[in-house]
Image: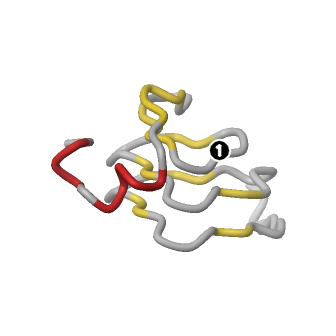
Amino acid sequence: RSNRVYLTPLEIGSNVLIGAKSLIMPGVQKIGDNAIVSAGSVVTKEVPANSVVTGNPAKVIYAFSPEQRKDTKAII
């Protein structure tokens, strides 16, 4: 067994919500502003700003305007 640790730079934008037990895999460089990563998601590539991602691998299921993010009832 190898006990190697891989470190890669990751930029997390402002006002980002990352759900419990989500995995952000090595190689992901950016999670955009106002993004929502749902619980248990496995993020394997960049998350665009103003979007909701979910699944394994995580996929964009909803994109919204920044004004909608202020009103969380519009998303949930």
Circle 1 residue: 48
What element does badge 1 sit on?
A: loop
74 lies left or right of 63: left
Q: Quadrant of the N terminus?
A: bottom right
> Which coloring applies here?
secondary structure
Q: Is residue 21 left or right of residue 66?
A: left
Q: Is residue 54 above or below residue 76?
A: above
Residue extending farthest to the front is 67
* Furthest residue toward bottom: 14
Q: Amino acid at mark 1?
A: Pro
Coordinates of residue 69 in the picture (x, y in percent): 36, 55
What residue is at 54 percent from the left and 27 percent from the top?
Answer: 59
Q: Residues within 10 Å of mark 1 (few under 14, many from 20)?
A: some
> In the shown orientation, is residue 9 left or right of residue 67?
right
Please state which of residues 15 and 22 is positioned toward the viewer in this rendering: 15
- Residue at 64%, 68% in the rendered image: 12
Image quadrant occupied by the C terminus: top left
Residue 36 x %, y % = 43, 51
Q: Pinpoint residue 19: horizontal percent, then vertical percent.
A: 34, 57
- Residue 41: x and y, percent? 44, 41
**Which residue lies at the image location 52% right of the left edge and 29% below the top edge?**
60
Q: How many marks do you count on the picture?
A: 1
Q: Is residue 39 left or right of residue 48?
A: left
Q: Residue at x 47, y 71 (%)?
A: 15
